[in-house]
Image (cartoon, grey):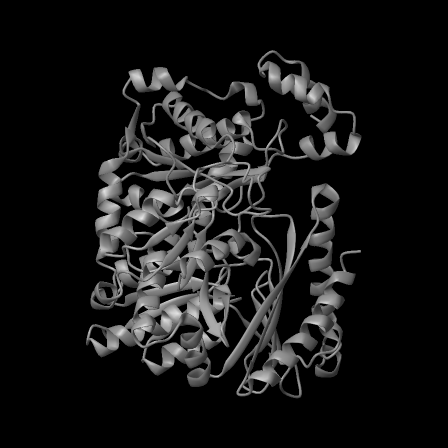
Amino acid sequence: MGYMDEYELWKTDPFFDEATRAELAALNDPKEIEDRFYRDLEFGTAGLRGVLGAGTNRMNVYTVAKATAGLAQYIISCGEEAISRGVVISYDSRNFSPEFAAVTAGTLAAYGISSKLSDELRPVPMLSYSVRYFKAFAGVMITASHNPAKYNGYKVYGEDGGQVPPEAADAVLANIGAINDIRTVKTMKLEEAVAKGLVTYFGSEADEAYTEMLTKLVVDQSAIDRQADMSIVYTPLHGSGNKPVRRILERVGFKNIHIVKEQEAPDGNFPTVALPNPENPDALSMAIELAKKTNASLVFGTDPDSDRIGAAARIEKNGEVTYKCFSGNQMGLMLLDYILDAKQQAGKLPDNSFAVTTIVSSKLAGAICASYGVELQEVLTGFKFIGERIKLDDEFGNKHFQFGFEESYGYLSGLDVRDKDAVVAAMLICNMAAASFEKGETLADRLAHVYEKYGFGFEEAVSVTLEGKEGIEKIQNSMAELRNELEAATDVKASQTLLGGPKIIAVRDYKTSKRYDFSGDEVKITPITLPKSNVLLYELGGEKGLDWACARPSGTEPKLKIYFGVYDSNEENAASRLASLKTEVAGYVKEKLK
């Protein structure tokens, strides 16, 4: 069936609700129709994410039901134990999140699978925790994380609380692909599913268990006790972090927390912020204004599903007060150093300890781990890979996980959550700020100490957004061109034309699992052991031998992301070289998108 046939079916068949048919009947842009129906919304390694609206390539109750049918059939194929353990479902503040959660529960019920449905919005880390707490077989989180308001999504979790592994995702995808007619998907009204005992609600029990678990991850309770009145400003950015974040901060003893009231209530339109993403300093602007009024030492905000957190620290110089926003890498480095240092001084850092970060995160993490005798593991982008290392090396191995982070403002401590957790990160950041405050310092001072000890590292990323079918094709074509240029560089001299001219030491192609080494007289190709992914990472050497650049399509948005990292013993040199590299490489890659 072609996309116009699908469009006509959705527009006219009474199976689809009246609002859906009316929305489609009002369309008069051929490209818009094509974009909505030229494919099914892609089910990736963790689920769906897309623009809200009617169509096979959109997030709506029908695509959610179809995805859930695929998940249900996978669970059934895993046997009676999987069916009996069921699924935990939660959702955030996005538009239609409660409705999609209800459809998920009802569809599972129609296939005979029970579920526990959150009785109100709760964030990603609580969903991950609850899967483990209730010993469920799987979990579903309705969220589009930090995306713009027009998006929503559907994330699937495995029994370990981590995002569903690739093998299971492939099985679910195959089941979805076998559904040729969306009208054949079984569904059940939520009310009927509840009446039959196939859906039950969960709430305060999980809240209390999760909060109590987090209290055990405090690094230095004495610092909190002595700095309990430290002024802190928090904004939930209209998301799901408000209650759990405030609950843990109050539980461990912080008494002077100010909430940005205009951004406290859940609202899927995010009316006070252009983009509900704490990676963007503008998202903290209202919080910073409140911080100036309350003399706050620390400001932080969480995204809609509370898996990412951004923070800023008060700086007073010559009578002028400003707030420094930290990058995801900077906060990750500070937390890593703080946790390892505090545990080592307390004699609580076990042998065989390890930390995990991603291939596009700061390379200074290696120097920090080395100074404490801790192994650093690098994985592909995505916290599912960090969760996987915890499972393999701590839960089923003889190593001890200490901390994990990725550059995109995601952090994790402890073993009971297997996705990035802005709630535990909020507690840890406040704990770290209290420890600094005791010394008469801010987190900005702490960052300066990290750079003084381990060298200066500056990282940055440029994102190019290209929506629609044509945009996706341009992004894929640009990656193909870069890969063709790499494969054509059959000698060391030819390699120096890659990326427009910076010195290339080696290139890692994670899609073909090959590392091309150009450092000698001849090109040497060795295998890469990480899973395959559409990523090209360029090793560029530099003063410390750590400089790099990377290109990869985003896994959650229609973007091509270009990363850079430069490391130097001199701050000015590092900043200058980063600026040059960014201009040269970003310009070269962007040309591929035209």
Q: Quadrant of residue 216?
A: bottom left
**Residue 63 at what x, y percent from top left?**
54, 29
Q: Which quadrant holds residue 133?
A: top left
Picture layout, residue 564 above or below residue 480: below
Q: Which residue is painted at 42% across and 26% down in the image?
A: 102
Which x, y percent locates residue 376? 39, 72
Furthest residue in direction front, as rendered: 319
Residue 388 appears in the figure:
no
Identified at 56% across, 46% down, the residue is 273
Quadrant (top left/top right/bottom left/bottom right) for the C terminus: bottom right
Closest to the observer, 80 or 433: 433
* Residue 545 quadrant: bottom right
In this picture, residue 72 sits left or right of residue 402? right
How many numbered marks have been drawn onto this rendered protein structure?
Answer: 0
- Residue that protrudes farthest toward the top in the picture: 14
The answer to whether 234 is drawn above or below residue 123 in the figure is: below
Which quarter of the image is occupied by the N terminus?
Answer: top right
Q: Is residue 44 visible?
A: yes
Q: Position of residue 417 (x, y in %)?
A: 32, 52
Q: Residue at x 58, y 22 (%)?
A: 181
Residue positioned 46% across, 54% down in the render: 290
Relative depth, front residue between 503 and 323: 323
Percent coordinates x, y for residue 244 in the rendering: 32, 46
Residue 84 lies, with reference to residue 374, above or below; the image says above
